[in-house]
Amino acid sequence: MDNPFRRRRSLAVRVGNAVIGGDAPISIQSMTNTKTEDVAATLGQIKRLVEAGCELIRVAVPHEAAAQALGQIVRQCPLPVIADIHFDVRLAYLALEQGAAKIRINPGNLGGREKLAELARRAAEKGAALRVGVNAGSLERALRQQYGGATPQALVDSALSYVEELEKINFHNVVLSLKAADVPTMIEAYRRIADQVPYPLHLGVTEAGPLQSGTVKGAVGIGTLLAEGIGDTIRVSLTADPVEEVRVAKEILQALRLRQFGPELISCPICGRCQVDLLPLVEAVSRFLQAYRRPIKVAVMGCAVNGPGEAREADIGVSAGKEHGYIFRKGKVIQSVAPERILDALRAEIEKLDLEIEEI
């Protein structure tokens, strides 16, 4: 799929068998919410995330038991494992020894620039990357006082100061993030730093909230920046099953035509013209489309007004009516079916189209 937006050029940073930045596609990340030292539970959740389409996995490392468990997880995980470290740099050293492909740190709570430099030296020895994650909630006190709070420029200044320390020791295997729970602050911080550094940017709205409101915040914040060509990897932070984070991330990328993960389902809003119970039909179509991987556009419309005409660009679709459902391709009606046969008829035509594409 052609990228419709001119993407900011960044360095290519290797994270295990993956690449962030450069010419690599914008990647999807998530984070497990299991106790990392419970290896079986963590690997079970990782399996679900992989099946959902996650491409990099982050795990919490709050203590030594979690760090010691990383080795088993790394050996059995098909994706690069990122260790999330706060406060205790010794845990980061241990995570590197256990094979973590990247260490996510917030230098503001790590204990000083000397510890950051030593961590970078050890990461370089292991061929690992660092994500320098500046967070509005843990911004250095001096910058808060200087700017009167966690402003976009305060976040940028914090990130640049750490980049300067890493560049002094010639460490460039760096990914940056400047996260805030406030969406405008997050957007502006990334805009300001995008032209000042060559490093890949990890996008996210931190502490975005539960599924519905968090999805909106993530889509607005991440989507705005991606539409401006900013961003190399994303995580949609939700107070929900992490699989939902991956699903939302895929929807954001697909909506902007930056990635294609399978069929795109379009459906009309339900209004007084609708003559069928449209919502169950749309949900049923959405479920069976999950089995398909080809980039086709499928329309489910609730009346003649929003039927083949407005959905003309769909590869295949249905206009559902009280007495008939009209199956159409590229705006042309190909058959009329009884309402109770709409789902089966639509599925059959999608399978036929899928086979046709395969033969091309």
Image (cartoon, helix red, strand yellow):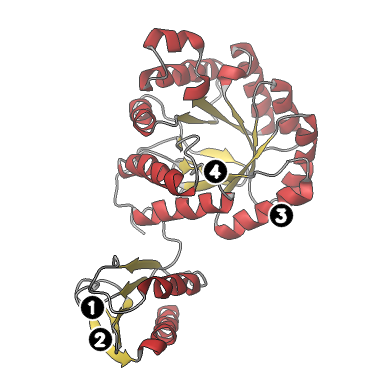
Q: Nearer the viewer, mark 2 or mark 4?
A: 4
Q: Are marks 2 and 1 in contact (CB under 8 Å)?
A: yes
Residue 308 is tagged as 1
> Label 1 sits on what residue type?
Pro
Residue positioned most to the front: 272
Q: Give the quadrant of residue 101.
A: top right
Q: From where the camera sits, is residue 23 visible? A: no
User: Which is nearer the N-term, disc 3 or disc 4?
Assistant: 3
Q: CA distance from mark 1 to mark 3?
A: 44 Å
How far is mark 3 from mark 4, CA to CA?
A: 19 Å
Location of mark 3 (residue):
44
Q: Secondary structure at mark 3?
A: helix
Q: Which residue is mark 2?
A: 333
* Alpha-carbon span between mark 3 and mark 2: 46 Å
Q: CA distance from mark 2 to mark 1?
A: 7 Å
Is 73 drawn above or below residue 359 in the view shown?
A: above
Mark 4 and mark 1 in contact? Answer it, CB < 8 Å.
no
Residue 39 % position (x, y): 78, 46
Where residue 187 appears, as percent x and y from the top left, is: 35, 33
In which quadrant is the N terminus drawn?
bottom left
Residue highlighted by disc 4: 239
Tell me residue 344's x, y (percent): 44, 86
Earlier sequence position, callout 2 versus callout 1: 1
Q: Is residue 183 left or right of residue 206?
A: left
